[in-house]
Image (cartoon, helix red, strand yellow):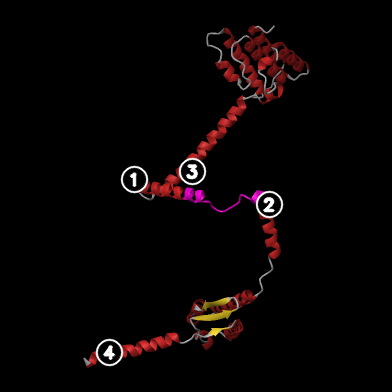
Amino acid sequence: MTAWRSYILAGLLLGAAFCRADSEPKHVLSPDEYRAQIDSLLDAADQMDNSAEAPHALQDLPERWSIHTDHGDFDISTEGLRRDVRKYNADKNDKNADAISIRLDSLRQEIDDFEKTPPDTSAQQNALDSILRRREFRDVHGPTILDRFKRWALEAIFHLLRRIFGRLFGSSVIPTVGKYFVYGLMVLAGLALLYLVYRAFLRDQGFEEIVPHDLPVSAKEWAVWLSEARAAAAKGDWREAVHLAYWAGISFLERQGFWKPDRARTPREYLRLISAGSEQREILITLTRIFELAWYAKRDANESTFSQTLEQLEKLGCR
């Protein structure tokens, strides 16, 4: 029983000693005191000549420096500096000595920069506030509840897909699936672009400049179209002549009731409106081919091309 009391008493005494040691106040430096210590260490570093170990001041460093400033208290670790000193003691050369001096210079510069008065940015802040008060920035805001919900939903879907693909194929397949998904989107975008170009190629951009937007082709008599075509041919503008002559044929057929007027149709769409057994179909196919080569494909058109166009119009009945 006496032995147990002795152990308990010894434990209490040791605990009190540790508490007393922990309660001892640590030495807090002012910026000037810290700067003076760094300057002293720099002087010691300058004395190293690669013939002996680092000066005692560099080897007897605390674990950290505690600094008190008007902006608050903070600690600066000496681990990096102590590591440089140990490296120098193990291999005494100019490179390791310079590393110590460079680190001390960096610590000196940091405390100098910390104490500098921050620049006055009130003018810039006022200018920024003035810009943000403008009408175009009224709706600018951070993520809304809906935005956060969308993000949560997307993350949940991605997590679910990752678990599914991970179970089916293993986790290594996820980056591959993501890569092919992106490639698939690129292919779809390319196909969509090609389709738009195709549609733009088939539609006659010049047609919209000649025919008013709210009128069909047949609003202008086929004879007027043909007269304008002959006038263009007289000027030597064979491509425009073929273009106008083609629409003369379309206006003629539209007046004959082969289809309902619609200014948005393409040449190929007019062909699909004529039945396969109609004699006018073969004539329109030839007329359309001549027109597309001269107008859309921008082939060289000449007097012969225009004569072929007039020949097809005469077969339609445009005399």
The residue wearing badge 3 is 182
From the image, state whether disc 3 or disc 4 is nearer to you.
4
Is the residue under label 1 in contact with that under label 4 (CB below 8 Å)?
no
In the rendered view, tell whether residue 235 sits above or below residue 80: above
Q: Earlier in the sequence, mark 4 or mark 1?
A: 4
From the image, state whether disc 4 or disc 1 is nearer to you.
4
Instruction: Check disc 4 and report its element: helix, strand or loop.
Output: helix
The residue wearing badge 1 is 168
Q: Position of residue 73 (x, y in %)?
A: 55, 78
- Residue with the most extreme left position: 1
From the image, state whether disc 2 or disc 4 is nearer to you.
2
Q: Which mark is residue 134?
A: 2
Distance between the alpha carbons at the discs numbered 2 and 1: 53 Å
Q: Earlier in the sequence, mark 2 or mark 1?
A: 2
Sort mark 1 into few (<14), some (14-19) or many (20+) by Cα contacts within 10 Å: few
Query: Does 154 sit left or right of 8 as displayed?
Result: right
Distance between the alpha carbons at the discs numbered 2 and 4: 77 Å
Magenta range: 133-151
Query: Who is closer to the viewer here, 151 or 283?
Result: 151
Instruction: Check disc 1 and report its element: helix, strand or loop.
Output: helix
Q: Amino acid at mark 1?
A: Leu
Q: Position of residue 280 (x, y in %)?
A: 59, 9
Sort mark 4 into few (<14), some (14-19) or many (20+) by Cα contacts within 10 Å: few
Residue 178 magenta: no
In the rendered view, tell whether residue 181 sits above or below residue 198: below
Q: Amino acid at mark 2?
A: Arg
Query: Does 227 sit left or right of 54 as displayed?
Result: right
Instruction: Check disc 2 and report its element: helix, strand or loop.
Output: loop
Which of the 4 image quadrants contains residue 45? bottom right
* Mark count: 4
